[in-house]
Amino acid sequence: MYAKTYYATHPDMMDGASNDDLRDRHLVSDLFTPGRIVLNYSHGERFIIGGAVPGATPLALPVQDEPASAKGHPLLERRELGVVNIGAPGVVTVDGEAVALDRYEALYVPMGAREVLFHGEGARFYLLSVPAHKAYAMRKLTLEGANPLALGTQATANERSVYQLILPGLCDSASLCLGLTILQPGSVWNTMPPHVHARRSEIYLYFDLPEEGRVFHYMGEPEALRHIVMRNEEAVISPPWSVHMGAGTSAYAFIWAMAGENLDYTDMGICDICQLQ
């Protein structure tokens, strides 16, 4: 069922880790395969990280097939799901209710949904699911209703718009927080100032990069930074102890998703640039 399983990590595991080790432990690739749903499992906050690329026929979110005690149960039996369309217009049908999603639009799917179908040739649905304790209302999220934060400056090459989508006050959830950041032309740095989230893990999906474009994603403890070179439509898992920031060869967009024991967007440990080594 899962293309790959990612295990929780300790900061000491960074010591002596090769570039291949870092990529194996944190980089999530090959999410968007035509005609398929691809799901990956991370032990960090029990995230499921996936992609759905329907063709002429819809794709159905699979039922659980592991472990044996869960076999045959709906995937969202005890989970909530965030869906973001990063491709052409498409439709997500949840237990018979169809919701159209244009590019950059999102859908919050509550715990307990039994059938989730993805429709639309050219649509590219990014999927993020975490355990939930309560079923909140299904809700469609658009950039127009997201009250963007304008951050950074052109002079520091990090001018960007941050769209908060699944967050308290905008869309209730049990644990999942999600949003979209779009960098302005000429800006390449994201997440400045850098920070860590001691009480939650975070996933970044970088996209809207040209074929030859790359993002250098920085991670690790502030005093011992490492980096992973990432291509278009690749995701990276950031543990609670890790800085997460990046610089690209051109402007790009990224989807950030967090889960843990709190829903406070501002709960973070800010790092001064001078701390980084």
Image (cartoon, rainbow, N blue to C red):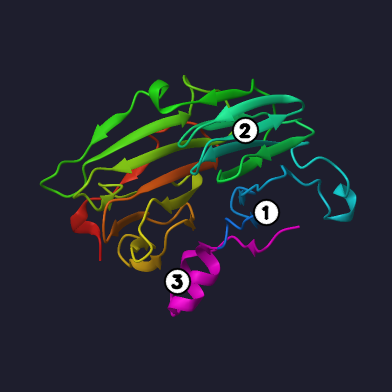
Please name the residue that numbered disc 3 is placed on.
Answer: 14
Q: Distance between the residues labelled 3 and 1?
A: 36 Å
Q: In which quarter of the image is the N terminus?
A: bottom right
Q: How many marks are shown on the rendered structure?
A: 3
Is residue 181 rendered to the left or right of residue 8? left
> Given the image, on which type of amino acid does mark 2 rest?
Val
> Given the image, on which type of amino acid does mark 1 rest?
Gly
Does dot 3 land on a helix, a strand or a loop? helix
- Residue 26 appears at what percent x and percent y? 51, 63
- Whichever of labels 1 and 2 marks the residue nearer the N terminus, that label is 1
Q: Distance between the residues labelled 2 and 3?
A: 41 Å
Is residue 14 rendered to the left or right of residue 81? left
Q: Residue 124 carries which label?
A: none
Can you tell which quarter of the image residue 173 is in? top right
**Magenta region: which residues?**
1-29
Residue ID at (84%, 53%): 65
Q: Which mark is residue 35?
A: 1
> Given the image, on which type of amino acid does mark 3 rest?
Met
Q: Which mark is residue 91?
A: 2
Does dot 1 land on a helix, a strand or a loop? loop
Circle 1 Cα neighbour tier, 10 Å, few/some/many (<14 / 14–19 / ≥20): some
Does dot 2 land on a helix, a strand or a loop? strand
